[in-house]
Image (cartoon, coloured by chain):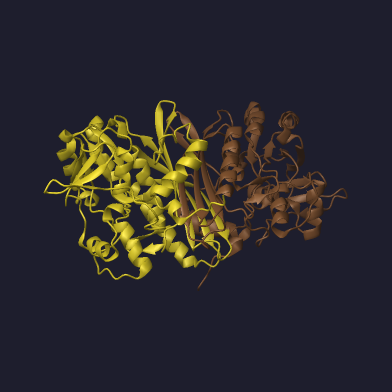
Chain colours: A brown, B yellow
């Protein structure tokens, strides 16, 4: 059979998951990649380091609220953070299309440098490739990042227990919808800009709660729905979201209704999902809310309910299934 | 002024060097990137780790003697090795074009896995992106790699002294010419295949010679000429190559003459330039030659001669200048 790669293989939904399982895990899944973390935890003498990589192909590379340069920094910094690492060093690799305006490159690299400074990380190694016109869509970037594991944080979905609180650090879907709107010339008023930003401040707010923090993840490709579905897969309980508890901005709501896309399926690039013991929820919420990037934090649900399923419970007690998105809803949002 | 990126900005020659200096060093050059090593040396408690990244855009992605998958492993492994690190972990990020045959992806990932096994490194974290048809030339790959610094090796061009021996681990230019021949349908007989391979075996042969080893580098983009010119830039002496001492295979010689391209300017992907105290040269040569990948090792010259210049001394005593290549001789060979 003459199978070919489809856009949906990269979209963060079901076809992505199958490609990764069949082609990546089958070859590389014996080591730290086994559970497909966004970042690997690696022993180095007494320390544990956290190591992650992402390529960025966002279109357009300038979008409302940011550009590919800062996204490339925050994307990897955030993956290191949610694996419980304090990000320290980044690599930076560029693939640039022949004919790309040098001024655009300068703007992008300025943003890259500023974002790195904001996160307290240093770009320590890099690479630059140029490909012929027509072999790249302007610029693609890759970063990888190294952090040092925070002692006392033990993160993993296996630590989640029924009753644990599910927190999101702010309104969801801004990044994906802002990019989509920019790409399709949809007017969104002033309200809708990407949430693209760093999570290391939020990590530090969670650290004092130690082993009461069970799980952290940034809901990028596939959105909150994809992260929650990954968590509950094969588990003896599920996650129940509370109707209307999921924070959605006016800008996102209007584009979402216009396009018929659920914000739960849309990528954030500066939000954190954190699952913790109920006893820590209020404290973490108040820590998150003390920072600008966490001021919209709230509890959106609890662990429990139908085994292996994410459901949304309405006021009348009816449950709606929140499934893993299938197909390619939003290509190239990161 | 409306400056645009040209192919030569990525070719490893003069324009590449200017782009990196003006746009990368100006923004990120305060830390470990200062001297533009191929890999960064980073302190992590008692250890030093070596960290490097490269993106791979080679065209064609299947070439005589290899493919982009193994190249992506060896390229980063080798950068870690020549910085004095024992490679341990790799990241792997894919950008795939919509419509790419899944069978090609499988072959490439098989080679990736095999190459990683051969080098004793583990792929521990990754990322997969898919872009629309026409926004990538099949597949681009990025790897980054982490190694642990070998104690007792202190490498750096500032340690080179006049009289030191310049060693190359084998015949040069095979990779670049093999890719170029494949791309342009040049028939080369059986002889010409890429030298693409790992350098960690050669590193271990050098380790026992400790501080007599001054410098190691893999001559990739820009070839041996670019590496040697980077070494001598601003130095009070130069490097003198011996006429006919540079090992060139028959296959490379014939394509080189056909195209009028000097093999000194053409990339290798499995060769090492090593500079050491004369007293260690014979021992290192014999160590290199004990391995299949080093059996063509020889001394090609010595440190000395005209300040800041690489020259080739003929039998009659005349010196020819070996300059940094300018323009874009060979785009997308790695």
Q: Is residue B30 above or below residue A61?
A: above
Query: Percent from the top left, x then y, of residue B249?
Result: 21, 59
Res. B258 image quadrant: bottom left
Res. B227 image quadrant: top left
Residue A208 visible at all = yes
Residue A30 visible at all = no
Q: Nearer the viewer, residue B195 or B6?
A: B6
Q: Nearer the viewer, residue B26 or B283?
A: B26
Judge left or right: residue B238 versus residue A125: left
Farthest residue to the bottom: give it.
A1
Q: Is residue A297 above or below residue B256?
A: above
Residue appearing at x 11%, y 49% in the figure: B315
Q: Quadrant of the C terminus of chain B?
A: bottom left
Q: Nearer the viewer, residue A242 or A173?
A: A173
Q: Is residue B115 above or below residue A2?
A: above
Query: Percent from the top left, x then y, of residue A267?
Result: 68, 50
Residue appearing at x 35%, y 38% in the figure: B83
Query: Percent from the top left, x then y, of residue B143?
Result: 45, 48
Farthest residue to the right: give it.
A316
**How many numbered callouts?**
0
Query: Percent from the top left, x then y, of residue A95?
Result: 50, 52
Judge left or right: residue B10 versus residue B235: right
Farthest residue to the front: give it.
B1
């Amino acid at each position: 059979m003459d199978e070919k790669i489809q856009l949906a293989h990269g979209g963060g939904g079901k076809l992505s998951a199958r490609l990764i399982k069949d082609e990546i895990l089958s070859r590389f899944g014996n080591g730290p990649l086994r559970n497909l973390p966004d970042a690997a935890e690696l022993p180095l003498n007494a320390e544990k380091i956290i190591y992650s990589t992402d390529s960025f192909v966002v279109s357009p590379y300038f979008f409302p609220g940011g550009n590919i340069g800062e996204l490339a920094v925050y994307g990897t910094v955030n993956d290191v953070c949610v694996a419980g690492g304090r990000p320290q060093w980044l690599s930076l690799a560029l693939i640039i299309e022949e004919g790309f305006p040098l001024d655009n490159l300068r703007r992008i690299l300025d943003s890259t440098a500023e974002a790195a400074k904001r996160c307290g990380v240093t770009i320590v190694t890099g690479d630059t490739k140029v490909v012929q016109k027509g072999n790249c869509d302007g610029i693609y970037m890759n970063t990888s990042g190294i952090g040092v594991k925070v002692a006392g944080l033990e993160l993993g979905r296996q630590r989640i227990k029924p009753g644990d609180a599910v927190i999101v650090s702010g309104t969801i879907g801004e990044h994906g919808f802002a990019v989509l709107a920019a790409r399709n010339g949809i007017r969104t008023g002033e309200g809708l800009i990407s949430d693209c930003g760093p999570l290391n401040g939020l990590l530090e707010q969670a650290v004092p709660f130690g082993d009461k923090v069970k799980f952290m993840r940034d809901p990028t490709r596939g959105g909150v729905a994809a992260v929650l579905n990954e968590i509950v897969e094969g588990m003896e309980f599920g996650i129940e979201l509370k109707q209307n508890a999921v924070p959605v901005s006016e800008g996102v709501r209007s584009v979402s209704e216009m396009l018929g896309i659920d914000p739960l399926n849309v990528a954030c690039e500066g939000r954190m999902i954190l699952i913790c013991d109920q006893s820590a929820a209020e404290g973490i919420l108040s820590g998150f809310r003390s920072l600008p990037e966490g001021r919209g934090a709230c509890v959106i649900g609890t662990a429990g309910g139908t085994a292996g399923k994410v459901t949304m419970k309405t006021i009348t007690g009816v449950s709606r299934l929140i499934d893993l998105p299938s197909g390619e809803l939003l290509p190239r949002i990161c």
